[in-house]
Amino acid sequence: MSLKASHAGVATTSDIRVRCFRRQDSDEVRDLFWLAMAIGPGSPRRIALDAALVKPAAKAAYTLILLGLSATFMAQSRATKHFGAILSLSVAVIFLGYRYLLSRSFTDLFKRWLTEDLADISSYYHMHPAGDGTEDFVASGPRGFWVVESDLPDKSGTEIVGIIALGEI
């Protein structure tokens, strides 16, 4: 199978292929998984964190922080200044704590997947060597794992750009 890839809307002559998993792919697969799911642009974690910034609760937090800061710096009474500072600080801590917990829920889930099915891919997906002297693993049942690779732009090799995994239903 060969498809033409395009980067940023510009067609390239790079081929994209689906091939059997090889044990030496393990680290690159795990790195790609972490990038795609946790830290890369468009990852579920980043999308959730970005979306949380514009939710009504976040807008209420921004308003309360600004009101607290206004009271802190513009109020005449010492008690109002203290109240404003405490309000701003409290809401900011709660807001940042929520973002931390949201981020942590994603990273904990992805770390669990990295230590379960992606820790030993060939065992988890019931793969066995394709034959003597080959590095390829093939599926031995309904489970399977393949990598999607693309030629590097300078044609010096290939890189893994995706995975196909069939696990338990």
Image (cartoon, rainbow, N blue to C red):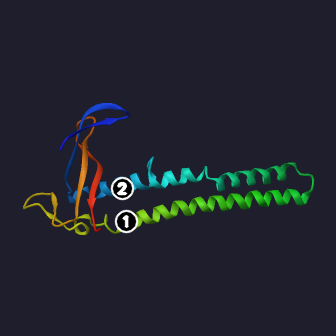
**Residue at image location 17% in from the left, 44% down from the top:** 1
Residue toward you, 23 or 7: 7
Q: Residues within 10 Å of mark 1 (few under 14, many from 20)?
A: some
- 86 vs 71: above or below: below
Q: Residue 85 at x, y = what percent?
A: 80, 57
Query: Helix or strand or loop: what does disc 2 sit on?
Result: helix
Label disc, if present, on residue 56 of the rendered structure: none
- Check disc 2 and give the amino acid type: Phe
**Residue at image location 38% in from the left, 34% down from the top:** 8
User: Label 2, on which residue?
Assistant: 33
Q: Quadrant of residue 12?
A: top left
Q: Residue 56 at x, y = what percent?
A: 65, 53
Q: Quadrant of residue 90?
A: bottom right
Q: In the shown orientation, is residue 40 left or right of residue 70?
A: left
Which of pointers 1 and 2 lies earlier in the amino acid sequence?
A: 2
Q: CA distance from mark 1 to mark 2?
A: 10 Å
Query: Helix or strand or loop: what does disc 1 sit on?
Result: helix
- Check disc 1 and give the amino acid type: Trp
Q: Are marks 1 and 2 in contact (CB under 8 Å)?
A: yes
User: Label 1, on which residue?
Assistant: 113
Q: Residue 141 at x, y = what percent?
A: 17, 67
**Residue at image location 61% in from the left, 52% down from the top:** 55
Q: Quadrant of residue 95?
A: bottom right
